[in-house]
Amino acid sequence: MIFRTALALAVAVGGYTAASAVSAPTLDSLRLPKKISAQQGHARFLVGVRLSEPAKLTVQVVNAKDQTVVQTFTDATARPAGRAYMRIEAVDNLGYQLPAAAYRLRIQAVADSGEVGTMIEGSFRLSLNPPHGRFDAYAVPLWKAFRSQNRLGARVRGQFIAVVGPRGAVAQAGLRRGDVVTHIGGRPVDTPGAYATALRAMPAEKPVAVTYIRRGRTVETEVTARPDWEPAPDYGASLVVATRREPRSLALAFARVLEHLDNDEVDQARALLGTWPKAWRRSAPGQYLDGELMATGDRWKQALGAYNRARKRDASIAAVELGRAIAVIEMDKPRRAIGILKAAERIDSKDAEIAGYQAYAYLRAELGHLAVPAGQRGVALDRYYADAYLPLGIALLGLEQRAPGVKALRRGLILIEDAERANRLIATYLNPTDP
C-alpha cells in the first residue's frame, strides 16, 4: 500500500466543466507519550490527533532502528472531525508482541472522497513489564451446597478446584480435583472477589505460594505460572471426564455448566442444566445458573426471578446479589440496584467487581458524587480491574474534575480487553474531554 500519495485533481473531460478541488483533511495536535511502559502480552497505548474534517485514519508503527514497518491498519469507517483517540495494540502485523525498542508512529488522514491529507509523526520508546501468569485450574466458589455435599466444615472457605490443566503449572505443583485453595501469595482467597484479584495479579515465571486443603489437611506448595498469552487448557474436556467419574458431585456439575457459559456456549449450558435432577435444579446453584442463562438472552425479569429463588435458598452468595443488581439496572431501576449491591458488598467486601457495579449504578442514578468513592474502592481492591477505573473516570469527568478523570479513564481503557467497548468509551467520553 502506498502510504502517502499526491492529491488527485479533477480536470475537464470532453464537454464537462472542471470540478473544484476538494480540500484534503489535515491533522494536528498529536497526543503520544514519549515513553510507554506496558504489560508484556497485553501491551497497548492511546494516541490522539485532531481532524479538520471527517476522515479515515491510516496508522503505521515503524521500527526506529531499521525503519521497517511493523504494523499498519486503516479505519473501516470515517471518524468525525475533532479530537480522535485510538487504542493501539503493540503488536506486529502477524499479531506478535512488539519487543521493547524505539519506534516512530505515522498517521495519515483520507477523506471519503479519496483525498489524502497530511501526515503527522511522533516517536516513542516501548518498555515491557513482566507478564501476568495463568493459574491453570478451573475453580468454583465453595458455596454452602458444595461444602455440605463434600463434607467440608462450615468454617472452610476458599475456591473448590473442579479440574486442573493437564501437565500445567498447577498440576505440577501437586494440586488436583477436590482441593480447596485458601491462600495465594500469602493472602486469603476465601471469597470469589479475593480470588479474582489474586488471579489478575499473579506473575508469570515466578514461584507463588499457594495454600490448600485436602481431606481436612492444610498443604502448602508453590506454583510457577506460565504467561497468560499461552493457550488455556481445555477445561471442558477435563470437566466431562470429572463429572463422569463423580456423577453425584453438584460442584463438578455446576462447574461444567458454568464453563460453557464462560465460553459463550449458551445452548450447551442450557441443555446440560436440563439434565440435572430436580433437586439440583431447585438448589441455589441451579437457580443461579438459570438466572445467568436468562441474562444471556436479555430476559431480565425472568433472570431476576431465578436469582431471587437462589437467594431464598442461600442468602450468602454475593454472585446472586450481583446478578439481581445487574437485572434491575437493566430494568432501569438503578436506585434499587444500589441497595442490592450494598448487600453484595456485605457478603464479599473484597470484590472489585461489586464496587465497580456500585459506581455504574450511581452513575445511572445520576449520583456521580457517590460513584467516585465506589470507583476508588474498586481501584484500591484491585489495580488491574478495568471496570473500577472506567466508572471512576466517567464520574470525575461529570464532576468537572478533568485531570484525574482523564487519568482514570485512560487507565481503564488500557486495561479493558474488549476493544470494541473501549472504542465506544473513547468516542463517548475521552474524545470530547480533550478538544
Image (cartoon, grey):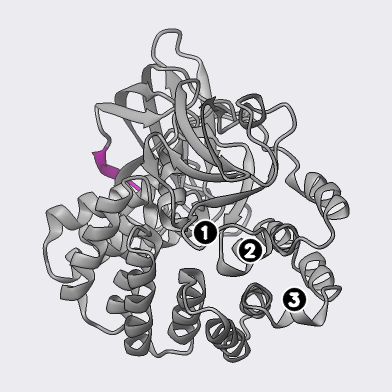
Q: Is residue 157 left or right of residue 163?
A: left
Q: Is residue 148 left or right of residue 241?
A: left
| Stretch in magenta | 25-31
Callout 2 secondary element = helix
Residue 345 versus residue 256 in the image, above or below:
below
Give how far across and how far down residue 27 sits, in percent.
31, 44
Residue at point 32%, 63% (across, down): 349
| Residue at the top extreme, as displayed | 66
- Mark 1 Cα shell of 10 Å, populated few (<14), some (14-19), many (≥20): few
The three-letter code of the residue at mark 2 reads Phe
- Is there CB contact under 8 Å for labels 1 and 2? no
Q: Nearer the viewer, residue 123 or 43?
A: 43
Verify whether residue 30 appears in magenta: yes
The three-letter code of the residue at mark 3 reads Trp
Give how far across and how far down residue 227 sits, in percent.
55, 27
Nearer-N-terminus badge (1/3): 1
Q: Which residue is mark 3?
A: 280
Q: Which residue is mark 1?
A: 17
Counting the numbered discs, the total is 3
The quadrant where residue 100 appears: top left
- Mark 2 Cα shell of 10 Å, populated few (<14), some (14-19), many (≥20): some
The three-letter code of the residue at mark 1 reads Thr
**Which label number is shown at residue 146?**
2
Q: Nearer the viewer, residue 392 or 178?
A: 178
Q: Nearer the viewer, residue 264 or 16?
A: 264
**In 3D space, how far apart are the residues under numbered discs 1 and 2 (Cα atoms)?**
81 Å
**Which label number is shown at residue 64?**
none
Callout 3 secondary element = helix
